[in-house]
Image (cartoon, rainbow, N blue to C red):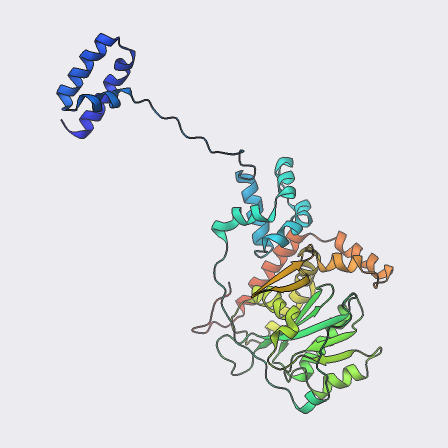
Amino acid sequence: MGGKSRRDYLIAIRQRYVEATREEKGVILREFCTICDYHRKHAIRLLSQRKREPRKRPGRKPVYHSTELLRALKRIWLTTDQMCSKRLVVAIPLWLPFYEGLSDEVRTKLLSISAATIDRLLAPIRARTRPKGLGGTRPGSLLRNQIPIRTHNWDITQPGFMEADTVAHCGNSMAGNFIWSLTLTDIHTGWTECRATWNNGANGVLKQIKNIEKDLPFQLQGFDCDNGSEFLNYHLVRYFTDHKPRVKFTRSRPYKKNDNAHVEQKNWSHVRHLLGYDRLDNPELVDLINNLYDNEWSLLQNHFRPTLKLLEKKRINSKYKRKYETPKTPYQRLMESTHLPEEQKEQLNTCHRNLNPFKLKRTIERKLKAIFKLVRVTPNVRQRI
């Protein structure tokens, strides 16, 4: 008798064996041993086995595993451009009022979810790779001797002290003409503005700096940059020297990227994450990108995307222990600042009440499609992630 036949025969007589009397069990057992050629003790074990019930999962029942909750969490995470869990916990209450079609139960759970739970739920779908770009900083002129190095932190208890950097949209080659992105980040609040310029000449960069300063919700008080020639030139020195009130113009140490750590981080989250690593060598794109930077992108990043701020850093043996404050949006930090006039706060508050992050995100995607239709596809150029 084959294995399958033995199993079928066992299933057929097992219930009858369990319900039989002692004498009847002996008859069934001898018959089973004879037909299947089993040892008596092995046959008794097979006939006496009961169907095992599924083992219950130990501990309390899962709280955050409903399909609707996972769908909503994934959509918010992707719409916020895959924000880290500690920032996403703070961003969810800002985005949730504009999320339509959710039940009250799911909304309550999303408002109470922890960063560790978000990491666990999103682990299967997290992005794993990030491409790298080329550096475009070139040494500036002899003006470096006239522009002091910032050897200590400014008064970062008030907005207005900003770090600046540029990003080259050159693809795989720095040759020829292409678009650059200028990024300015406020150290105290994290308020960030970006603009695009054709090449990185002094006149183009200065024009975009003036444009950013005009749109800032606070007064520019300090300007810190790297040692690139787009910043260390007579045009920018003259502008900040004649500026009323005068702006503190400083530079970082050569080859020390961490001196401008605030803006260096924004080069990824505000520029590369939006435009990727493609080569943008079409002059028609400058106005389209600036239209996006100046409107929807600035509003989304500064009003609805919380940022982490380092409070303390200690070295313990060979490791560093960092302590961060609760994530907040640049808008929230501005509203809490005592150095911003109440009139300016009221204007910011009015603007904030009229914004919908999901509508901003849809408009951004629509404008990005128009931008990348004009991107010239060249061989061996990394695609936008």
Left/right placement of residue 355 relative to residue 341 reads: left
Quick one: quadrant of the N terminus?
A: top left
Q: Is residue 204 left or right of residue 385?
A: right
Farthest front residue?
317
Res 302 → quadrant:
bottom right
Q: Quadrant of residue 207?
A: bottom right
Above or below, 173 against 301 in this view is below
- Relative to 53, does residue 196 appear above or below in the rendering? below
Percent from the top left, x then y, of residue 28? 19, 14
Is residue 182 visible to us here? no
Q: Is residue 367 visible?
A: yes
- Which residue is at the front of the view, 98 or 249? 249
Question: Residue drawn 67% across and 80% down?
Answer: 204
Percent across and percent down for residue 274 are 58, 64
| Residue ID at (75%, 55%) | 352
x, y percentage for residue 104? 65, 36
